[in-house]
Image: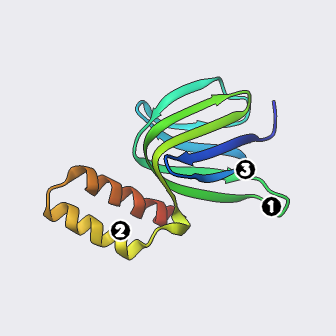
Amino acid sequence: MAAELHVELVAADRQVWSGEATLVVARTASGDIGVMPGHQPLLGVLESGPVTIRTTSPEGAGTVVAAVHGGFISFADNKLSLLAEIAELADEIDAQRAERALERARSESDAAAERRAEVRLHAVAVR
């Protein structure tokens, strides 16, 4: 079993993150899933939720957190692809702006916008 897997996190408009990892946790239509090196091949639907990537690098291990809103997850041959409709790294998220978006969504009874704002705030909190 390999010690790491290659991860590509791609949004519709850009490559968000790429690198080596020891564990990736994502939310799928079937529930949260953790993928480690040597995992069984997988193809699933991503739900809105945080994605946590335990990275490996010459400087040491770290964690990358992203807010992902819909898409697909695919794993084979120690290569994990997360193809998201929308994805943002937690470091890129403005928490105050996300809080305002959450308040606005709640006042307008917009469940989808409310979920997106909640996922963004959760990603910032996990970071």
- Residue drawn at point x = 68 percent, y = 37 percent: 36
Viewer-side label of 1, 2:
2
Which numbered disc covers residue 98? Answer: 2
Residue furthest out toward the left: 108
Residue at 28% from the left image edge and 72% from the top image edge: 100
- The answer to whether residue 23 is left or right of residue 52 is right
Where the N terminus falls, by quadrant?
A: top right
* Relative side of 107 to 11, left or right: left
Q: CA distance from mark 1 to mark 2?
A: 31 Å
Residue type at mark 3 is: Gly
Residue type indicated by callout 2: Ala
Question: Do the residues under discs 1 and 2 have CB atoms within 8 angstroms?
Answer: no
Provide residue 42's location: percent of width, then percent of height: 58, 25
In the current view of this chain or complex, which residue is farthest to the right? Answer: 58
Q: Earlier in the sequence, mark 1 or mark 2?
A: 1
The label on residue 15 is none
* Residue receiving disc 3: 19
Foreground label between 1 and 3: 3
